[in-house]
């Protein structure tokens, strides 16, 4: 069982070959817990149970991402809040959206992230990000990281969200590295690791729920 878990978590054929590492951003590099806690706080402000409201918000966030047509992430947040207002029978207030976007813009990276990225850069490895966020949101969060990313792949550029193979396929078409030279690191198993398996990408799963950190990875 231990060997199987390791195989699921890490699939690197030759560490010496790695020239490009792409990362999921939110939940992998950036801690999103304060964002969803802020969503629960909006519920409290409208006299609604924190946990109940947060679950409803997360449900609608997913539904908006995978609806009939693509909408930018900022609009996803707004629509999720509007549906919550409808469900919990209060009048939607655009201040709630402003509040969440402010929290989003100020999310912090996990403690080991900057050192890990600096180490990879020092090895001459290129770095990229694949994210469901929009480019403006992503750039706000990357401003705190003193490491330059070579490639940014965002939902608003690709007009779709992970885990669709459309997202990963578009990135694959743009990659300059081969599958042997490319590694993807992500905390989202369903959103990232499963599509990577289907495309035969080398991959590492960072299981943040079991307090795993990037510092455990050696390349």
Image (tube, helix red, strand yellow):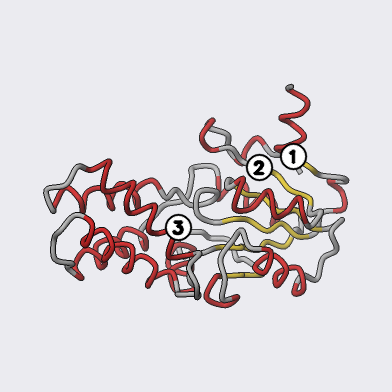
**In the depicted view, which residue is nearer to us: 143 or 63?**
63
Please state, as top left, top right, bottom left or bottom right, where the C terminus lies in the image: top right
Q: Position of residue 68 (x, y in %)?
A: 50, 72
* Circle 1/circle 3 CB separation < 8 Å: no
Q: Relative to 88, is 79 above or below?
A: below
Residue indicated by mark 3: 62
| Residue 205, disc | 2
Q: Position of residue 179 (x, y in %)?
A: 84, 59
| Residue 10, disc | 1
Helix, strand or loop status at disc 3: helix
Q: Position of residue 136 (x, y in %)?
A: 45, 74
Helix, strand or loop status at disc 1: strand
* Circle 1/circle 2 CB separation < 8 Å: yes
**In the depicted view, which residue is nearer to us: 115 or 211?**
211
Residue 131 image-quadrant placement: bottom right
Label 2 neighbour load within 10 Å: few <14, some 14-19, many 20+: many
Residue 38 horizontal side relative to residue 218, left or right: left
Residue at 50% in and 54% down? 26
Q: Relative to 173, is 180 above or below?
A: above
State the separation of the CA atoms marked 1 and 2. Answer: 6 Å
User: Which comes sooner in the sequence, label 1 or label 3?
Assistant: 1
State the separation of the CA atoms marked 1 and 3. Answer: 27 Å
Label 3 neighbour load within 10 Å: few <14, some 14-19, many 20+: few
Residue 126 horizontal side relative to residue 113, left or right: right
């Amino acid at each position: 069982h231990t060997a199987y878990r390791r195989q699921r978590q890490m699939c690197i054929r030759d560490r010496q070959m790695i020239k490009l590492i792409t990362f999921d951003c939110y939940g992998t590099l950036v801690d999103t817990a304060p964002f969803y806690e802020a969503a629960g706080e909006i519920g409290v402000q409208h006299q609604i149970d924190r946990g109940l409201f947060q679950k409803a918000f997360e449900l609608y966030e997913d539904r908006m991402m995978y609806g009939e047509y693509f909408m930018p992430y900022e609009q996803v947040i707004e629509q999720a809040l509007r549906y919550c207002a409808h469900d919990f029978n209060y009048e939607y207030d655009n201040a709630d959206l402003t509040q969440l976007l402010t929290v989003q813009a100020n999310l912090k990276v996990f403690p080991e992230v900057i050192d890990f990225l600096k180490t990879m850069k020092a090895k001459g490895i290129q770095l990229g990000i694949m994210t469901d966020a929009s480019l403006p949101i992503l750039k706000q969060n990357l401003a705190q990281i003193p490491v330059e990313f070579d490639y940014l792949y965002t939902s608003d550029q690709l007009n779709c969200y992970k885990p669709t193979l459309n997202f990963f396929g578009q990135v694959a078409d743009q990659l300059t590295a081969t599958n042997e030279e490319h590694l993807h690191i992500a905390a989202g198993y369903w959103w990232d690791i499963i599509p990577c398996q289907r495309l035969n990408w080398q991959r590492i799963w960072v299981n943040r729920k079991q307090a795993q950190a990037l510092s455990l990875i050696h390349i």
